[in-house]
Image: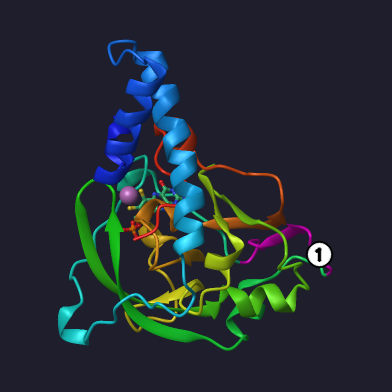
Amino acid sequence: MALAQLNRRGLLRAGAIALLSGCDFTDRKGTQRLLRTVSHVNDHAQAALFRADVRAPLFPDSALTQPFRFNAFYTEASVPEIDVARWQLQVGGRVHERAPWSLQAIKALPAITESTRLVCIEGWSAIGQWTGVPLGLFLKHIGADTRARYVGFRCADNYYTSIDMASALHPQTQLAWGFAGAGELPEPFGFPLRLRIPTKLGFKNAKHLMELFVTDDFPGGYWEDLQGYNWFAGL
Ligand SMILES: Nc1nc2c(c(=O)[nH]1)N[C@H]1C(S)=C(S)[C@@H](COP(=O)(O)O)O[C@H]1N2
Ligand SMILES: [Mo]
């Protein structure tokens, strides 16, 4: 399963290291350990190659996928029900302003609307249109230390993930609260707020956000920790 996260170059490198280290590919634990090491090396390589001026492609309205596709670690019947009157986004870690945010306050910030492709590691993709505040702008509002390494996210369904700061500051990375022209996210697609990051795989696009934090301590992620999916997960 962890093999799925590796690209061809990674596999070639894994093979070379395996030969050099005398690793036996019939030893499952040893192989998993090796592949994780290769995946972490790939995180650094991808981070080094990442360029904030390279944009994910945009699509015309005619290309929007309808109906949009749902995915989570549970079925659509189990989507968390969130009372938006009580909901707040908690912010923490290396930020100056720790006050939680209401949805209304987040919606009052300048927003961008973009139609981009969401690519799931399971082998499908869908084009959607999301509206929300650029995460970089939000981080500025909370006085985040943008020299920190990671931005972490925790969700109402206990899902969690994290991204590198350069990707957090990418102009297309947004805290999305609108979808397909509607002034709010449909429940299955992350109501009331989700991360939309078109430069990374779908599993980085955390839905039903409850908390955002800025940190130097590697926060990992649900699928990254469980399945060994490559953490950087760049497209
Ligand atoms: N909170 C939460 N966010 C999540 C997930 C999840 O299970 N819980 N699944 C991820 C995965 S694997 C994908 S592909 C996308 C799917 O988003 P969609 O339902 O809008 O298509 O959400 C991501 N964000
Ligand atoms: Mo996914």
* Residue pictured at 48% horizontal, 42% vertical: 41
Q: Quadrant of the N terminus?
A: top left
Q: Which SS does the magenta portion mostly show?
A: loop
| In the displayed structure image, the side of residue 178 where residue 98 appears, left or right | right
State whether residue 164 appears in this view: yes
| Pointer 1 residue | 98
Disc 1 C-beta below 8 A from ligand 1:
no
State whether residue 191 appears in this view: no
- Residue 138, percent across and down? 65, 76
* Residue pictured at 41% horizontal, 16% vertical: 30
Res 75 quadrant in image = top left
> Is residue 89 shown in magenta?
yes
Furthest-right residue in this view: 96
Q: What is the basis of the colouring in this image?
A: rainbow
Which contiguous range is marked in magenta?
85-96
Res 27 quadrant in image = top left
The local crowd at label 1, few if under 14, some if 14 to 19, many if 20 or more residues have their Cα within 10 Å, is some
* Residue pictured at 58% horizontal, 89% vertical: 110
In the foreground, 76 or 66? 66
In the foreground, 50 or 77? 50
Q: Quadrant of the C terminus?
A: bottom left
In the foreground, 24 or 16? 16
- Residue 51, percent across and down? 47, 72
Above/below status of 224 relative to 140: above
Amino acid type indicated by mark 1: Arg
Above/below status of 30 relative to 67: above
> Is residue 53 shown in magenta?
no
| In the displayed structure image, the side of residue 10 where residue 195 appears, left or right | right
- Residue 120, percent across and down? 28, 53
